[in-house]
Image (spheres, rainbow, N blue to C red):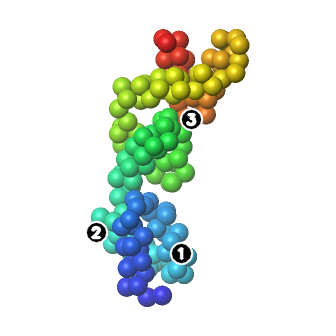
Amino acid sequence: MDKITALAKAHHFCAYQERTQAEVRGKLQALELWDDAIEELIAQLITEGFINEERFAKAYASGKFRNLKWGKIKIKQGLKVHGLSDYCIKKGLAEIDDDHYAQTILKLIEKKMPTIKEKSLALKQQKMIKYLVGKGYEVGLAVEILKAQ
């Protein structure tokens, strides 16, 4: 495949959703381009603004928090899997407002607690904390909000 066609495909690939360099590199490798051509295309996409990993991190973090109610730990792991730098990860996590974060934990507790079928309050709280940790929330913060209730 020639570079012009590959660039058009890469533009389309990046235009409808935020992408990381690794995702675009994988797509271009699937098109069987040479490594030098792939790196040139990625550099061009970055220059044109089609690839911006900081923007990806912000969109990923706010989307996973808002839509899936993920905690910062799980979001951070997801960003690391995408191969982002610590700087981009910090920028992405900074998109999450601390007050909104605590309110989300409280809402999750209020929604999940009645569904836990334990008689003992201690066991109920233990299961609740396990649930929140599974969603990626910090243990200390989860315990603090649960006890304040």
- Residue at the disc numbered 1: 29
Q: State whether residue 125 is above or below residue 68.
A: above
- Residue at the disc numbered 2: 48
Identify which residue, 39 or 64, lies in the foreground. Answer: 64
The residue at the point 53 percent across, 26 percent down is 111
How crowded pointer 2 is (Cα within 10 Å; few <14, some 14-19, many 20+) is rated as few
SS state under label 1: helix
- Residue at the disc numbered 3: 135
Q: State whether residue 59 is above or below residue 118.
A: below
Q: State whether residue 35 is above or below residue 49.
A: below
Q: CA distance from mark 2 to mark 3?
A: 36 Å
Q: Tell whether label 1 touches label 2 (CB within 8 Å).
A: no
Q: Of discs 3 and 1, which sits in the foreground?
A: 3
First reached walking from the N terminus: tag 3 or tag 1: 1
The residue at the point 53 percent across, 16 percent down is 146
Q: State whether residue 120 is above or below residue 27.
A: above
Q: Position of residue 10 (x, y in %)?
A: 41, 74
Q: CA distance from mark 2 to mark 1?
A: 20 Å
SS state under label 2: helix
First reached walking from the N terminus: tag 2 or tag 3: 2
Q: Position of residue 50 (x, y in %)?
A: 33, 66
Kindly indicate the quadrant of the structure image that contains residue 13. Answer: bottom left
Q: Position of residue 133 (x, y in %)?
A: 59, 30
- Indicate the amino acid at tag 3: Lys
Q: CA distance from mark 3 to mark 1?
A: 34 Å
First reached walking from the N terminus: tag 2 or tag 1: 1
How crowded pointer 3 is (Cα within 10 Å; few <14, some 14-19, many 20+) is rated as some
The residue at the point 39 percent across, 73 percent down is 12
Q: Residue furthest bottom?
A: 2
